[in-house]
Amino acid sequence: MHAPRLLACLALLALLAAACSEPAPAPLRVGLLVWVGYSPLYIAAEHKMNAPVEAEIITFSTGVDMERAFIDGKLDIIASTLFGALRLADQGIDLQTVMALDTSDGADGIVARDGIASMRDLKGKRVAADLATISHLVLIRALDRSGMSTSDVEIVNLTLEQTTDALRAGNVDAAVSWEPFLSQAVADGAKKIFSSAELPNEITDVLLMTREAAARRGQDTVAFLRGWDRALEFWRARPSEALGLMARAQGMKVDEFESSMTGLSLLDLARNRQLFDRSAGGPSLWAAYDATAQAMNKAKMLENTPAPAEARLNPRLIAAALQK
């Protein structure tokens, strides 16, 4: 073989070897709580829809444990709510919201015993809610929209499971709840007097990253966001298989899983583009962030003045994920 041709072949082999030896990106470590709205993420992970990056999903039983792992740098992404994002940021974490996963269009609400027909009827009554959680925020916003405040009711601090039992036993007059417990309470005879459908996009689950991680792992995150969209497409194309996989991931039967999705809207990339568009008018993450921040400030849930939405909402990764 002539020398020039030999050198060319050797150079090509060197390039191929370098390409083959290039390490795959480190898995994205994703922290989740048990919640049906996150279920498509399990489809994406199971079917490698986040390629070329791999998603390592770590499920936590409590938000405290998940947030601690995130703060300690053991997670790249966590799913939470805007309420949770503001609480974390209040602790000094430089957070960014990079995607909205789902929004509650009735999956959260307030149920009351017989004889109470509206929020105004709760004046002076005992209302069960899990304080310093999204349930607390739902109660604050519901009271506010009815021209009331938390001083108009007696809040009984109970976990979700305890609120259900307390309402059934008649120990409280009303309770903040979510699906499937919300529908179960109505089936037991309670009346739904407020629904999250009255708070468009405010009760929204989102993906959170630190600003540093969003910049350092931007391309990997774009692949991860596209995986969510592919999972939603898979669900539409093969519903039985998708429902079975998601129900297993949540430790539920398929019919229980489907019931738990009542009043919940999953948000694809196209819908995210609308929610992240501040100029479009109508419901948006910007308005939801501002409303949540104002409500938490009013209830003295935050130690510090929250950063403006511009510092916490990152629309760039959604825009990149939508590019073909």
Image (cartoon, grey):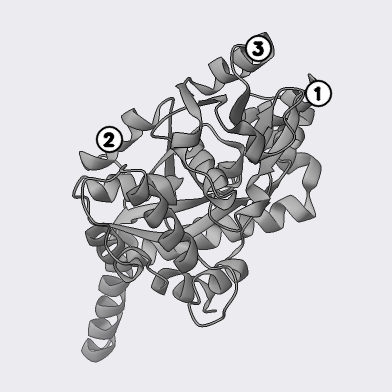
**Disc assigned to residue 69:** 2
Residue 87 % position (x, y):
31, 45
Does residue 32 appear in the picture of this structure? yes
Q: Distance from label 2 to label 1 (Cα)?
A: 38 Å
**Disc assigned to residue 124:** none
Mark 3 neighbour class, 10 Å CA radius: few under 14, some 14 to 19, many 20 or more: few
| Residue 169 figure quarter | top right
For mark 1, give the secondary structure. helix
* Label 1 sits on residue: 187
* Label 3 sits on residue: 170
Residue 71 % position (x, y):
23, 41
Does residue 54 appear in the picture of this structure? no
Residue type (three-letter) at the residue carrying disc 2: Ala
Q: Nearer the observer, disc 2 or disc 3?
A: 3
Residue type (three-letter) at the residue carrying disc 3: Gly
Residue type (three-letter) at the residue carrying disc 1: Ala
Q: Residue at x 67, y 44 (%)?
A: 195
For mark 2, give the secondary structure. helix
Mark 1 neighbour class, 10 Å CA radius: few under 14, some 14 to 19, many 20 or more: few
Say above or below: 130 vs 309: above
